[in-house]
Amino acid sequence: MTRFLALLVVSICAASQAVAQTPGRPFSQRPITIVLAFPPGASADTTMRMVTNRVTEQTGQAFVIKNMAGGAGIVAATAVRRAPADGLTLLQATLTTMATNQFLAEEKPYDLVADFRPVTKLWSLPLLAMTSSTNGVKSLRDLVDLARRKPGGLSYSSTGVHTVPHFLGALLAVESGAPMVHVPYSGASQAIFDLIANRLDLYFVSYASVISFMRNGELRALAVGERKRMTALPDVPTTAEAGYPGVVLPAHWGLLAPAGTPDESIGLLNEMFVRALRDPALLKATAEQGTEIVDTTPREFGDMVEAEFNSLQRVLKATGMEKK
């Protein structure tokens, strides 16, 4: 019996060591919570679930997606900032919005550099200037002309004050000189329906959010607010090609962990997500939705955070939103 128990112990230890050395092992036996500043069904939500599903398939790691919309991302960011620094709570961050909140909020909600640690960039999401297909507008210049003729000016939407869609609309108003009124919404769905019904004139929004409405002819894409055309929509011009080169603001998305998260945890998380992001099936599926997957090292993503601050200062100055 003693010899049997000894052999059993040896076998268990060997099996445990083999599991520990298996590539793609789960980060933790507990689920990782990823906090999103968007409601369920938004493109940020669906794409994040695609990524985490792939991580789960590759490693067995479980995830919980927690949607905490509100406060232009401050609610979600604050929740993660206060979470234990154990690698089990992450923030899906939109860098421009995160930096904006730090610059413009009445009370500084967080320090983007001091309160968080970068894990990896996830993707870039070019935004389309969309309008109703029934208002006679065929180009961005047509839309600007409509704004000049329409009593009270043109209305444009966003998913909140100081978000990327808000900035792109404001940049267009400044560069074109046309009167435009910002109408913030809490989510994309209602804004899209109001755009179709001509209760709104313009919405800078992700392709994934409007694919079906473009295909059935209810919405028209006028331009993409990026420096290059989208692979999924090669016939849609950039804002520069449409006559407004200053209306450019990429939306960079990535994962942040609370400050104090150990280097080992950051490294393991980066390894898991980068492997999933490079999966050919995921790359194909996201490209079809207009999402450009981009993985980075934690250091590279940290450098992007700094670059985003510099870019945002230009936008705030151009739109007159900088804090006095």
Image (cartoon, grey):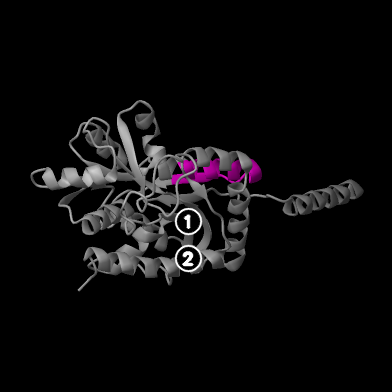
Which quadrant is home to the N terminus?
Answer: top right
Disc 1 to disc 2, C-alpha distance: 10 Å
- Picture quadrant where residue 195 is located: top left
62 inside magenta stretch:
yes
**Amino acid bearing label 1:** Gly
Work out whether 94 lies above or below 199: below
Mark earlier in primary sequence (1, 2): 1
Which is nearer the eye, 202 or 14? 202
Residue 304: numbered disc: 2
Where in the figure is residue 75, as x and y percent of width and height? 32, 56
Q: Which mark is residue 57?
A: none
Q: Which residues are magenta?
A: 47-65
Task: Please indicate, yes or no, whether residue 185 appears anywhere in the rendered image.
Answer: no
Give the camera-side residue of 202 and 240.
240
Residue 259 sits above or below residue 282 on the image: below
* Element type where label 2 sits in the image: helix
Secondary structure, mark 1, is strand
